[in-house]
Image (cartoon, rainbow, N blue to C red):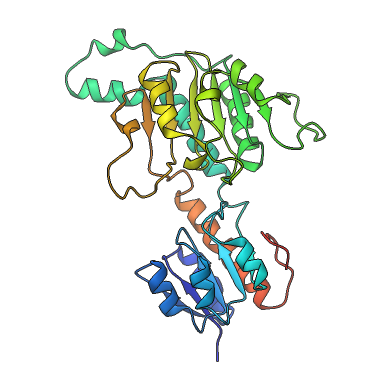
Amino acid sequence: MNQIILIPQNVDESGKKYLREKGYELRVLQDSSVKNICNNIGDCSGLLLRTASCTKEVFDAAPHLKVIGRHGVGYDNVDITEATARGIQVCYTPLANANSVAEHTIMLILACAKNLVITDKELRQGNYEIRNRMPGIDVYGKTLGIIGFGRIGESVAKKAAFGLGMKILAYGHGLVSKKLPDYVTITEEVNELIRQSDFISLHIPFSKKTQDFMDSKKLSLMKPEAVLINTSRGGIVNEDDLYHALLEHKIAGAGLDVFKEEPFKETLSNLFQLDNVIVTPHNAALTKEAMARMSLDAAIGIDEVLSGKKPSWPVNLI
């Protein structure tokens, strides 16, 4: 009998084809609720997971589960502690979407700098004079502060430095001992990076330590003309504090791809009412190319574990 891989939310064909060719049976769901996952995971050996939650309840319903292939870079929707305690290997796809998210970050930087959304809106309403009333700014020569300097942060830095002529400041754990390109200046004090930067781009994972990382205190350190970009996780920014900073023009703007609540269950965030905010629906990594890479890499991780090989991209140690 073939081993069964549960896929709560459909993925690109590349990963499914890979698993089928390896002899696995796939079970793709239309409803990714915890209840429906629990109803379908009982006889499954692997779980190819996108954004659906993998809680203790799911683990309780999955006595044969050996591996979770996380379709993406973040894994805050998986109870890693519970998985490790049960001997379940969790893998992820750290190489798959770095370029796509970096490109999206650069897009948000430029869109904010050039007032793209508000000028588009005004021009469609016949306001040609908006060109004189809301001039954009050049990013050339401006300082981009990157908080979190992993694969995505490094890619953003390279694109911004070579493509846009920006100065790069970087903050992250272990950077002082790491050899970085000459165009990157390391700062050991995150507050100093915030003070000096014209644009700040967040690339840190969400955790209890980073929750509300960008709060009123840190926002107050930003230049009045500075812009905050977040393509990481919504929870690392205190949205109420950011709203008031933008409303009161303590900072110039923000470009946000991620939010504390996704998708929105009730009312939209107050941030959506502001003209100096550009928002996208957590789709920085959802390019056709990145989706194919994430699907395939998650599938590779699942097969590596189930075939007794050492996983290429493990999250936990089993």
Compared to 193, does 294 lie above or below? below
Q: Is residue 172 left or right of residue 98?
A: right
The residue at the far left in this view is 126
Q: Quadrant of residue 38?
A: bottom left
Residue at 49% across, 35% down: 237
- Residue 48, position as x, y percentages in the image: 52, 68
Residue at 53% across, 41% down: 232
Q: Is residue 51 left or right of residue 147?
A: left
Q: Quadrant of residue 39?
A: bottom left
User: Can you see residue 252?
Assistant: yes
**Towards the viewer: 190 or 16:** 190
Residue at 46% across, 66% down: 13
Q: Quadrant of residue 81?
A: bottom right
Q: Is residue 302 left or right of residue 183?
A: left
User: Can you see residue 17?
Assistant: no
Q: Which image quadrant: the C terminus?
A: bottom right
- Residue 280, position as x, y percentages in the image: 38, 39
- Residue 290, position as x, y percentages in the image: 51, 51
Residue at 64% across, 71% down: 88
